[in-house]
Image (cartoon, rainbow, N blue to C red):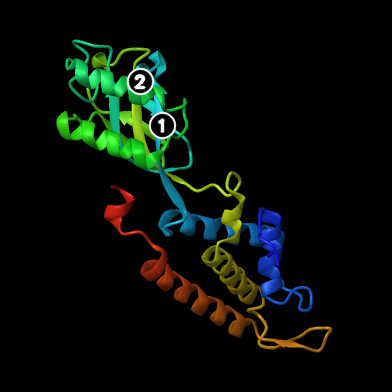
Amino acid sequence: MAINRLKDRIEFGKYCLRKLGDPVVMVNVSPAQIDDAIDDALDMFWEYHADGSVQMFFKHEITQADIDTRTIEIPENTLAVVRVLSLGGGSGSSGIANFDNLQYYAYFSDLISKIPGGGMSSYVMNLQYLNTISEVFNAEKLFEFNKHQGKLVIQGDTSKLRVGEHIIYEAVVTNDPEEHPLTWDNWWLKNYATALIKKQWGVNLGKYTNVTLPSGITMNGETIRAEGIAEIADLEDRLRNEFQLPPDAMFG
């Protein structure tokens, strides 16, 4: 028998409300508060859950604006940049590595041809390929990533960069549920968002010790809030112990 999988944000929010009793019980939270809870749950999921992010390779062609501003725009869903490798224009271009070596240039040119502009190629295969190259050729760190700026900042001498050259960077990016809809059906994400909404519901009812609904059911705001907090703590503990990748696994 087929199981109904959550595949979009609207159905995800409705699921969370049903888990809290809707429509049998009126869950006193606004649509904006539901959206806030979902966003907060996604932030936690992306930052710490093993299924919340993926490591990918991206290709960028250097422009004059990159050189002038000493920054390179990268996708806004980037959580971390693991490393940057550069393809220089040949002898005299240092980039990140020593490109006087024609063998390196040939390897890197071949790799670039396999990576679509701004997109991802086979991660495992290319990771092994880049690891082999990096073990043979020393790399110079010329770029620094600032998550909140969403940019790669050029630290080295920009005179060594040339318009039209390419860099390849390996980055950790969020697993966007808009691109991968089954992300909405993740067990931890569903339960964490539900717990956040439950806590907010309790806060909304916090002025009242006992609220009697038209159905005759008595609600206690403080009890609901406390249950939500306890469920959040339990899920965060499980996240750390069961669903989080170790640091060395995330960053290679």
Residue at coordinates 67% horizontally, 57% vertically from top-left? 32
Q: Residue at x 52, y 77 (%)?
A: 231
Q: Amino acid at mark 2?
A: His
How many other residues sit within 10 Å of disc 2, few (<14), some (14-19) or many (≥20)? many
Q: Is residue 29 left or right of residue 160?
A: right
Image location of residue 77, percent across then percent down: 48, 42
Residue name at image x 70 percent, y 59 percent: 11
Query: Residue 11's mark?
Result: none
**Amino acid tagged 1:** Phe
Judge the density around disc 1: few (<14), some (14-19), many (≥20) Cα neighbours within 10 Å: many
Q: Position of residue 109 (x, y in %)?
A: 32, 20
State which quadrant residue 113 falls in.
top left
Relative side of 6 to 186, left or right: right
Distance Cα–Cα, label 2 vs label 1:
10 Å
Q: Is residue 4 above or below residue 195?
A: above
Question: Mark 2 or mark 1, which has the lower sequence index?
Answer: 1
Give left or right: position of 217 versus 19: right
**Residue 157 visible in the shown view:** no
Q: In front: 14, or 252?
A: 252
Q: Residue at x 78, y 73 (%)?
A: 23
Q: Give the labeled residue for mark 1.
A: 58
Report helix, strand or loop for mark 2: strand
| Left or right side of 245 for 220 | right
Residue furthest out toward the front: 1
Q: Quadrant of residue 83?
A: top left
Determine which quarter of the picture holds residue 240: bottom left
The residue that disc 2 covers is 166
Q: Check disc 1 and report its element: helix, strand or loop.
A: strand
